[in-house]
Amino acid sequence: DVKVTQSSRYLVKRTGEKVFLECVQDMDHENMFWYRQDPGLGLRLIYFSYDVKMKEKGDIPEGYSVSREKKERFSLILESASTNQTSMYLCASTPPTSGLSSSYNEQFFGPGTRLTVL
Amino acid sequence: AQTVTQSQPEMSVQEAETVTLSCTYDTSENNYYLFWYKQPPSRQMILVIRQEAYKQQNATENRFSVNFQKAAKSFSLKISDSQLGDTAMYFCALTGTASKLTFGTGTRLQVTL
C-alpha cells in the first residue's frame, strides 16, 4: 500500500516562528503537493513539485516556501508564521505516468497536520 | 482558470437510501479529468471515483456512480444503498494538462440510521 506520512498530526506555534512541515512518501512518486484545507474554502494548492529540487507555485504560495532535496520528502516552510496560517495542511503525491496522462493519476494524501498559530 | 462549485454544504441521507451530490465546474481545457474524493472524519482523503472528460460513458465503482454532463459542465456523484461508513466530507475536483487539482468547497454527508 502507498503510504504518505506527515511529521505531526497537531502542531502549535507562536507568531513569528519558523515552521517546518514534513511529508514523506514511500512509493517513488514523482509529483508531490501541499494543500491547505479551511472550512468553506475546500483545499487550496500552495506548492507542488514534479521532481527533486523542482518546485512550482500553486494558487496561494504567499508566506510559504518548499524544499525537495530527496524524491521521497517534500517540506513546507512557514518562514514567519502568522495567525492567518492556522489551518489543516495536507500533503499528497501521485505515481509516475503510466500510459495515461499523469493528470489522471490518483493523488494519495497524508493524514494532515492541524497547525495552530497563536 | 479552473473553478469547481459544490452548492450543497451539507446533506443527510438514511441508511440504504440513495443520495446525489452536485458539482459543476468550469475549465478552458479540452482534455481534463474529474474526481470525487472522500474524507472520513479524522481519516485520510481517498479517491472515490474518476472520469475522463473525453469518455461519454459515466464511471461507476460499486455503489458509487457519476452523472457526467459535459455540455452542462456538471459532474454529480450518486451513492446507492448508503452505509454509515459513507459519512464523510466529499470533494469534487478537476485537473487539466498539468497535475494540479482544483477542489470544490466540499459537501458534508451524514448517513443516519
Image (spheres, rainbow, N blue to C red):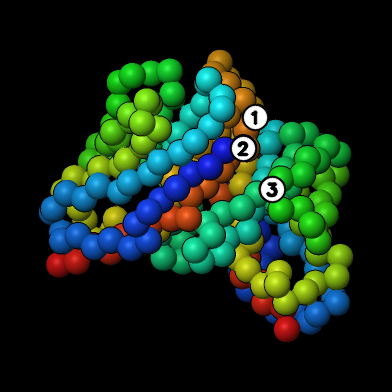
Q: Which element type, helix, strand or loop, lies under badge 3? A: loop
Q: Position of residue A107 (x, y in %)?
A: 55, 40
Q: Chain of mark 3?
A: A
**Disc 1 vs disc 3: which is toward the camera?**
3
Q: Chain of mark 1?
A: B
Please report the residue visible at 17 percent of the width from the left and 49 percent of the height from the top. B18
Q: Chain of mark 2?
A: B
Above or below, B74 against A60 in this view is: above
- Real-space Cα distance between discs 3 and 2? 10 Å
Q: Crowding at label 1, few (<14), some or many (≥20) Cα neighbours within 10 Å?
A: few
Establish whether labels 3 and 2 are both on one chain.
no
Above or below, B45 against B76 in this view is: below
Please report the residue visible at 63 percent of the width from the left and 73 percent of the height from the top. A10
Establish whether labels 2 and 1 are both on one chain.
yes
Disc 2 residue type (three-letter): Ala
Which labelled disc corresponds to residue B98?
Answer: 1
Please report the residue visible at 15 percent of the width from the left and 59 percent of the height from the top. B15
Query: In the rendered image, which quarter is residue B10 located in?
Result: bottom left
Q: Which element type, helix, strand or loop, lies under badge 1? A: loop
Establish whether labels 1 and 3 are both on one chain.
no
Which labelled disc corresponds to residue B13?
Answer: none
